[in-house]
Amino acid sequence: MTASPSTRIFGSGIRRREDPRLITGNARYTDDIKLPGTLHMVIVRSPVAHARIRSIDTSAAEAAPGVVAVYTGEDCSCGSVPCAWLIPDSNLLTPEHPALAKDRVRYVGDGVAIVLAEDRAQAQDAADRIHVDYEELPAVINPEEAAAAGAPQLHDDVPNNIAFTWIPNGDKDAVDAAFDAADVVVSERIVQQRLQPTAMEPRSALAQWNGATEELTLWYTTQNPHIHRLLISGMTGVAEHKVRVIAPEVGGGFGSKIPVYADEALTAWAAMQTGRPVKWTETRSENYVTTIHGRDHIEYVELAVNNDGKVAGIRGKVYAGLGAYLSTAGPGIPTILHGLMYSGAYTFPQIYCESIGVFTNTTPVDAYRGAGRPEATFLIERLMDKAAQAIQMDPVELRRINLIPPFIDGHDVAIGLTYDSGNYEAALDQALGMVNYDTFRSQQAKARDEGRYFGIGVTTYSEICGLGPSQVAGAVGFQGGLWESAIIRVSPSGKVQALIGTSPHGQGEETTFAQLIANELGFPVEDIEIVSGDTNRTPMGFGTYGSRTTPVTGAALVKAARKLREKGRLMAAHLLEASAEDIEYDDGKFFVRGAPDNAKTIQDVTLMTTLAWDLPEGMDPGFEESQFYDPPNFVYPFGTHIAIVEVDVESGEVKLLRYVAVDDCGPQINPTIVAGQIHGGIVQGIGQALCEGTIYDDEGQLLTGSMLDYAMPRADMFPWLELGHTETPSPHHPVGVKGVGETGTIASTPTVYNAVIDALAPLGVEQIDMPLSASRVWRAIQASNGG
Ligand code: MCN
């Protein structure tokens, strides 16, 4: 049969359907929504990192023009901010996180009062008139120092600021024995610097309370409306089914819109107090002090290797900064999503990891693109390069020796996970071919003789995403399920609405999910609309993060579509007066085997099942199916990334000359969108390697509090990113796809870092704390033998 271009489009790089409205300014974000009578909220925030509140004088603010109400922590009955990832067997302590600080502030940005006024300028003017008398206390910023004896204490009920100590089920004695027996042990102290997620749209909320029906509607920059409905219900006391959370267009999140924050809950609470709609939108500076930060680890890591290149074991101790309070998923990031990644793409026989979560007088830390997995990949790849140098083996060869051999249906690693499928060497070979590795090495040696310093970094990675299954979520203390659900609803005219519980916010599922459904049912992609981001319209879901939307919701959609196809087949048999066993399906048409010209289209069967004038016996009317889906395992995408850099040893400047990425996320639904995700991820990861990093002074003042001070990666830093791919389906996903939203970020940081260190190896430079800014690189060169 001839293929219709708009139905057989699995694997086609069609343009994103969401883009026209996004790039023409026609998208509607939370702050664009205007309700009559709206009050504007400004949050008064602590300017000091640690202090007791002696008193708050709100009288001048209350008397200011346009002010309707002022509330402090004493007046506020909004519930505390919950943590939703309670790591078991870790002695986790969960100190209270009040929505507005009552007697103590613990970081610059901690909310102490809210002002509600007729317009935003009036609210800001009045907020400036609130006088808070602070008794300043010593602050601590660095997680390792915060855990040491004598450090300033943040929470009275958390001795030594240690929120948890987590050790997965590694056998410490066996690991230690492997280290003792190994030929060489390499070690490193790694500072995974703090990063500030910088979504284009800062956070915003608009709340409307209907006192008569006791219904709360909240428009909200959220990655997970259903989870936020539950958590906001808990914080406001409004029954969950009376809370409607709507995510209009959301301008990126990168993890920072997963947590529930005090600010959005206060917006809702204030609407309930005043009976008027309330809007709050953060400024960029506010975003930098109050929206979660990422990473912030200090790690002591070691790798044991034998002279033949076989790794005997890996072990690490991580001090993970949590900020001043536990954010929603905070404890899960340096533990489950980090420690369980210590095997990477390798056959490491012994693995041991200890994560210590520590409170500091800083902005809370939570998931930032990759969340725990970039940190793990970095330490593995860093140690692999060091080990290669120690045993004088080519770093690619060392990796090759330790890669897990190809597998298509499960491989157990020592940390206790079963990877789904992988073919790591194929990705490595493709990437090496793309850069012409051997030629580069000889050119590199020659260039060094001429005083030019080129370096190459090679990362072979595997990562965990597609979070579920729910049983695992329960076992690791995640306070929710990780299943998804979807409804496919076809109207009599053959137009399709697919309602999903996850809430994409830039990733492109409006396009790829329409492609998935077109592929299964043969409706033209133009006739399929994906509906997400409204708890009253969509079925339950746990959110878009952990590159899970396609692995989990995508599977629910495919299964729902297949149910519809089966119903269509039965209806077609009835219409064609044939036996159902004789009906075949191809590209939106049902026909009796061998007679494709006498077909009923998917539109025909839709109409006849919805009209229900003459249904086969036992068939219910309507052409709609729903599907819950709990994945049986995570998915494990993988690949090889290679960077080539040149370092100007006079200035310390790093120039990225080539970047090659070969990623495997199973079959690609839309290669253009996949490439876009990988590009964005790579740039984000290289931002960490080369320029990004939060800086606090010793008193806890954020010195990188604006976009003038926080160094985002810029387009002129990058060459064209060269992508290749391999395709290893996941055995448990109905169409084999794995997630891809974070792979670029996970792989690129160590790739570029290792390339820089490789370039500087002849000068004796072995380690530089990230970011590798020109001044840091220059200083490292000066301090080295070469300098
Ligand atoms: N895809 C595909 N074929 C595959 C795998 C994925 O075509 N084999 C497509 C998907 O259908 C989707 C996109 O690639 O259009 C990413 O899908 P997926 O890997 O399922 O990731 P999620 O949709 O769950 O997105 C989450 C992920 C994360 S965790 C962060 S952080 C991140 C990211 O996506 N934040 C982003 N990418 C982002 N992109 C934008 N623009 N904005 C963000 O905030």
Image (cartoon, grey):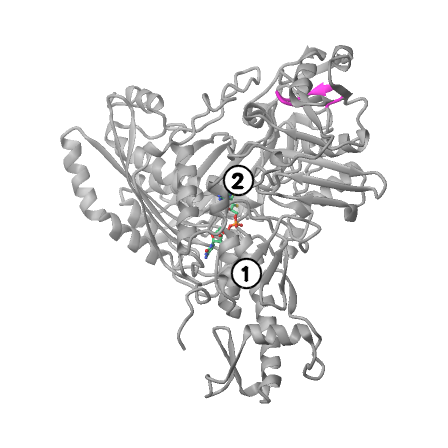
Q: Residue at x 69, y 76 (%)?
A: 612
Residue bounds of the magenta highlight: 101-110
Category of crowding for the residue at label 2, using alpha-carbon neighbours closer than 10 angstroms: few (below 14), some (14–19), many (at least 20):
many
Badge 2 element: loop
Q: Are marks 1 and 2 in contact (CB under 8 Å)?
A: no
Amino acid bearing label 1: Ile
Q: Is residue 346 visible?
A: no
Q: Position of residue 424 (x, y in %)?
A: 37, 56
Q: Is residue 781 left or right of residue 402?
A: left
Of pointers 1 and 2, the one earlier in the residue sequence: 2
Q: CA distance from mark 1 to mark 2?
A: 24 Å
Q: Is residue 105 magenta?
A: yes
Q: Which residue is mark 1?
A: 528
Q: Which mark is residue 704?
A: none
- Name the image quarter holding residue 679: top left
Amino acid carrying mark 2 in the image: Gly
Estimate how packed mark 1 is, as few (under 14), some (14 to 19) or many (20 or more) residues with alpha carbons within 10 Å. many
Residue sitting farthest toward the right = 212
Q: Is mark 2 within 8 Å of ligand 1?
A: yes
> At 16% from the left edge and 34% from the top edge, which residue is drawn?
447
Q: Position of residue 683 (x, y in %)?
A: 40, 38
Q: Majority secondary structure of the magenta segment?
A: loop
For the C terminus, give its image quadrant. top left
- Residue 584: horizontal and vertical position, in percent? 51, 82
